[in-house]
Image (cartoon, rainbow, N blue to C red):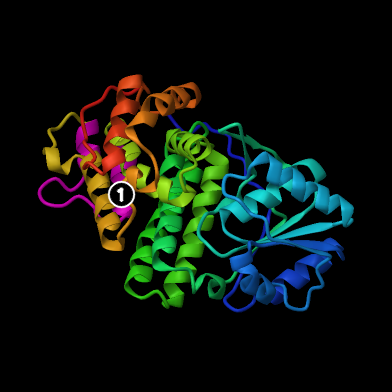
Amino acid sequence: MGMSFTHETLGQRVLFGAGAAAGHVAAELERLGAVRPMVIAAAPERPLAEAATAGVEAALWWEEVVQHVPVEVADRARTAAAEHDIDALISVGGGSTTGLAKAIALTTGLPIIAVPTTYAGSEATNVWGLTEDRTKTTGVDDRVLPAAVVYDAHLSATLPVGLSVASGLNGLAHCIDSLWAPRADPINQAMALEGARALNLALRGIAADPGDLTAREQALYGCYLAAVAFASAGSGLHHKICHVLGGTFELPHAQTHATVLPYVLALNAPAVPDLAGRLAAALGHPAGGEQEDPATAMLHGLPVAEGNHPAALAVTALGGLHRAVGAPSRLDEHGFTAAGIPEATHRILATAPASNPVAVTEDNITGLLTAALTGTTPAIEPLISR
């Protein structure tokens, strides 16, 4: 029947190079004609920020960075930017730092130079998020898309393995959500699958040797592709779930994404066997044995062994990665309790995308959260697609 879709690509400069951050940041400031930058970096990130902005004279250093970007923190930072006549924002840190820069840019239009030190991927999207009264609200606005992103593997080299893993799996969540998000198309699906391949190898490499600079570079490359795919495809069910858990229950961002991801995949994968099979291959687990291509077999009505179903292969592949890198696996380890499941389910149902491959119901979301609470092995069941 042919292809029919509309794909939008965001305009942004990406400067990649180990040890080159300071030079790239200075060059981008000059290109933007900015002379009074505000450097946003949490106190623990100050040494990295100073290295990344060496030779740049900051008009203001801002250290108050809080995950999920509370509205009151954003307001204070916006006021400070106005008082110091800031003409550019330099964010050095993870997703929360980038998120605060975006919150300032949303109301001021100031350009952002993002210097990521984790694998969150927020730097490559035009999506903003703010939390108020236990509710995290997100939106899309081109004003918050950083004008430039500076990737330097040296800046993530000291990120502890546990945080590297959680952050990288947050990036992988962008990949998997992008396969069937509301605006998914063949282009962002291709980027998502390549991002998944790179992140799978990178996280295994970092877990084996935290000082492996090649693995760190692959993680940055993978998280960038993941974020570009996500910016194009939109927010799927996984991110809606995690925004509720983070914004309402104050669960840590990256660890929550890492924990929930296998359960959302197990829910959706049976309804999209072709994409599940491609994801399994990207994660290093192609079909084997007599049934080399189970997705194709299913399309032709041929039988597929239960363990060789594309959904099973994808969930098995992701589970193998989680075990190999020691990924977070239980929501109750991060402060969530069974008492919160009814409210979380209600909030998730109110925001779940209608285009999700599987109909989202009170029963399946309650079951998903119940399993994720204690780390029960994700169950793959035959489900009816929308």
Residue 11 seen in this snapshot = no
- The quarter holding residue 378 reads top left
- The quarter holding residue 17 reads bottom right
Q: Secondary structure at mark 1?
A: loop
Q: Would residue 17 be counted in the magenta stretch?
A: no
Name above or below for residue 197 compared with residue 360: below
- The quarter in which the N terminus is drawn is top left
Give the magenta range.
273-299
Residue 277 seen in this snapshot = yes
Q: Percent x, y for residue 123?
A: 61, 54
Residue underneath mark 1: 329
What residue is drawn where x is 53% and y is 72%? 153
Q: Would residue 281 be counted in the magenta stretch?
A: yes
Q: Percent x, y for residue 59?
A: 84, 65
* Amino acid on which the number 1 mark rests in the picture: Ser
Instruction: Judge by depth and name the residue closer to the eye, 329 or 263.
Output: 329
- The quarter holding residue 296 reads top left
